[in-house]
Image (cartoon, rainbow, N blue to C red):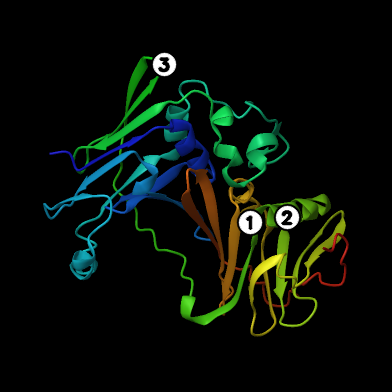
């Protein structure tokens, strides 16, 4: 009995979503009846998760390890039981994310289609149709010819089978799966949030890019209930810069900051979320009292469907005797 099967009418759609977390070679895959969860991390200071809900697929079937089949989402009356044996009902393994992305674009979908690639970016920044955010990146004229993708996983330890079909041509790939590693989630204290700000994702992307002119190593995020309300700043060998956001509701859709907070992160790690910033329509910027930063992106994939991604970052802690520079004095590039 096959544990999991799913069919997508667009392999390129899956490619674009998973490419957003392509900052590590391996991804941990968690299969549940709600969907697929791909998680990557680097040195336990950054963690990226892409959640592909079952609704993104034209068909989705998952047979629980307890033996009860499930199609799509669980019934309400089963929720309590599902919570109790969630660990028993979950399939977890590791795969090569690099190999998976190469497989999904085996029919020639490249980042040169309908847009240019910023080769200077360490994480391959993109412009053009895929940089406009929202559902524009998932329009048929951008995605090209439909390519059906069938995923299946027979049993624990078996390969992940991927069948791709386009214009009558079919290819089958079997990807080796590995035992999952202990991968603790970077904890975000949701009941002790120090800030929660929701805004258009492309505005965050523009701000991060503006700060790149100083070749910064660190990014400082300051939020306050009084002006200046929300400031991103950086310092580097080429100088310092800051981008300030006003509290206008048309700019910051949600603004919850009970008291002033200032935290610093490694700039290159936050930059790793650039693809998600470009594809998403909205971003929820959350931080807890320990300084852990969460960037949760909502990506519109067309036909009223959405996908979510979450990036978490551990704050930079200065060594003893080292003064942390908030970089709030320079407000060049303010909004």
Disc 2 and disc 1: Cα gap in Å? 8 Å
- Choose mark 2 or mark 1, whichever is in front: 2
- Choose mark 1 or mark 3, whichever is in front: 3
x and y, in percent, of residue 67 in the image: 11, 52
Q: Nearer the viewer, residue 64 or 122?
A: 64
Asked if the residue under mark 1 is in contact with the one under mark 2, i.e. CB atoms within 8 Å, the reply is: yes
Q: Which of 268 and 58 is in front in this view?
A: 58
x and y, in percent, of residue 148 in the image: 38, 28
Residue at coordinates 62% horizontally, 26% vertically from top-left? 113
Q: Which residue lies furthest to the bottom in this view?
A: 259
Q: In this view, does 117 lie to the left or right of 159?
A: right
Disc 1 and disc 3: Cα gap in Å? 39 Å
Q: Mark 1 points at which residue?
A: 270
Name the quadrant of the N terminus.
top left
Q: Name the residue under label 2.
A: 208
Q: Is mark 3 on a helix, strand or loop?
A: loop
Residue at coordinates 72% horizontally, 65% vertically from top-left? 250
Q: Is residue 47 visible?
A: no
Q: Residue furthest front?
A: 303
- Choose mark 2 or mark 3, whichever is in front: 3
Residue at coordinates 67% horizontally, 38% vertically from top-left? 126
x and y, in percent, of residue 276 in the image: 58, 49
Q: Is mark 1 on a helix, strand or loop?
A: helix
Q: Which mark is residue 68?
A: none
Q: Name the residue under label 3.
A: 167
Q: What element carries label 2?
A: helix
Q: In this view, does 234 lie to the left or right of 315?
A: right
């Amino acid at each position: 009995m096959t544990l999991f099967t799913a069919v997508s009418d667009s392999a390129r759609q899956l490619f674009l979503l998973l490419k957003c977390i392509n900052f590590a070679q391996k991804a941990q895959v968690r299969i549940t009846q709600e969907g697929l969860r791909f998680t990557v991390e680097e040195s336990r200071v950054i963690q990226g998760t892409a959640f592909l809900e079952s609704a993104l697929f034209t068909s989705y079937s998952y047979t629980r390890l307890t033996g009860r089949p499930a199609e799509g989402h669980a019934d309400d009356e089963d929720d309590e039981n599902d919570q109790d044996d969630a660990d028993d009902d979950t399939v977890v393994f590791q795969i090569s994310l690099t190999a998976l992305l190469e497989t999904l674009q085996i029919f020639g979908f490249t980042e040169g289609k309908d847009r240019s690639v910023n080769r200077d970016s360490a994480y391959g920044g993109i412009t053009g149709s895929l940089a406009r955010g929202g559902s524009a990146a998932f329009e048929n004229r951008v995605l090209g010819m439909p390519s059906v993708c069938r995923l299946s996983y027979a049993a624990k330890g078996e390969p992940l089978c991927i069948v791709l079909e386009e214009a009558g041509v079919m290819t089958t790939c079997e990807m080796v799966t590995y035992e999952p590693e202990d991968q603790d989630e970077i904890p975000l204290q949701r009941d002790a949030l120090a800030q929660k700000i929701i805004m258009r994702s492309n505005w965050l992307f523009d701000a991060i890019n503006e700060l790149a002119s100083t070749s910064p190593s660190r990014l400082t995020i300051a939020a306050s209930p009084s002006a200046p309300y929300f400031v991103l700043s950086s310092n580097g060998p080429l100088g310092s810069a800051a981008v300030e956001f006003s509290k206008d509701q048309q700019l910051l859709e949600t603004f919850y900051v009970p008291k002033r907070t200032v935290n610093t992160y490694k700039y290159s790690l936050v930059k790793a979320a650039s693809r998600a910033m470009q594809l998403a329509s909205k971003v929820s910027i959350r931080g807890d009292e320990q300084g852990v930063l969460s960037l949760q992106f909502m990506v519109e994939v067309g036909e009223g469907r959405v996908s979510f991604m979450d990036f978490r970052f551990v704050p930079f802690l200065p060594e003893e005797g080292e003064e942390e520079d908030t970089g709030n004095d320079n407000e060049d590039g303010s909004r």
